[in-house]
Amino acid sequence: MRILVADCSAEYSGRLNASLPFARRVLLIKADNSLLIFSELGSYKPLNWMSAPCTIREIVPKTGETDAKESDVDEFVTGTGGVTASEMTGGDIAGDDGDTAGRADDTAGEEHDGPVPQKVLRVTADKSSDILEVTLYHVYSDESYDLGVDPGLVKDGVEDHLQQYLAEQIHRIGEGAKLVRREYPTAIGPVDIMALNADGEHVAIEIKRHGGIDGVEQLTRYCELLNRDPLLAPVHGIFAAQTITPQARVLAEDRGFRCLILDYEEMKGTEDDSLRLF
């Protein structure tokens, strides 16, 4: 990972044209070549970015040139070992008149308004025509770090965990209940849990972390389909979640489903220390 702190401006062209005026910002370049631009204040989200897969070209204007054009720059392409554009083409890069050195000398004495760019990072998307061009005027810090392989975010309390614990503690839906299986297959997708109640009737259970109307509609589709099978009917429905919105509860009960609130901490066996004296 490469982190730069620099005075910069940026231009994005593609599906949407956007620009960032001159300011001091942080640039983050990841190992996959994606580039993100951050500011000191505001949201945690970047101001602008280019996601992988993409290619980064580091363009250094020649002496006396302020515009980073491909016809008069030394260009470094990420992944080519720092090969300049002239080396890749087998010779010097010439302008329209074939004499870039002469043009550089002619403009060396000219005065330019505003800061002079040191280099340009041109990021092009590999699968589209999107281009992000970041002009660097002064680089305060340019550091690279090898972060190694990240194990990723480990989430606790996701729907799969709720499903696992409820399957192991199927008695929570009623005494005498038995588990048929998790992820019970249907033609429109798997039901989270299929069980039998104390009377031997099938119960389809839809599990959500936060239960809304969409979850009730999903359970409705499952039950309507399963009740067409004479070997399964009647199939009852239970809408289980850590929280259920009032609208979802009204809709579920109106359709004959039972609502079940799941206490994740209790289900996974976490002790409650709130009433302990010592």
Image: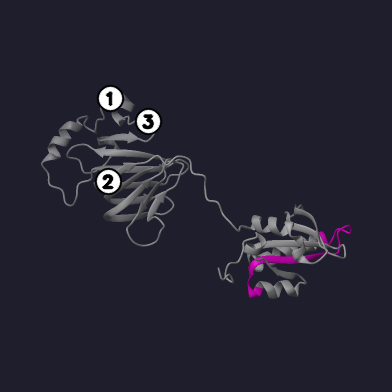
Q: Secondary structure at mark 2?
A: strand
The relative height of residue 156 versus residue 85 in the rendered view (above or below) is: below
Q: CA separation, marks 2 and 1?
A: 33 Å
- The residue segment tinted magenta is 226-247
Residue type of the residue flagged with mark 2? Ser
- What label sits on residue 141 in the rendered view? 2
Extreme residue toward the right, this view: 230
- In terms of sequence position, does the residue under pointer 3 or pointer 1 come before the other? 3
Q: Nearer the viewer, mark 3 or mark 2?
A: 2
SS at circle 3: loop
Residue placed most toward the observer, 146 or 87: 146
Residue 171 vs residue 84, the one in the foreground: 171
Q: Report the residue at 18% width, 37% height from top.
A: 63
Quadrant assignment for the C terminus: bottom right
Distance CA(mark 3)–CA(mark 1): 17 Å
Residue hosting label 3: 80
Which image quarter holds the N terminus? top left
Cα–Cα span, label 3 and label 2: 23 Å
* Residue, disc 1: 91
Residue 95 percent coordinates (x, y): 24, 33
Q: Position of residue 127 (x, y in %)?
A: 48, 42
Callout 2 crowding tier (Cα within 10 Å): few <14, some 14–19, many ≥20: few
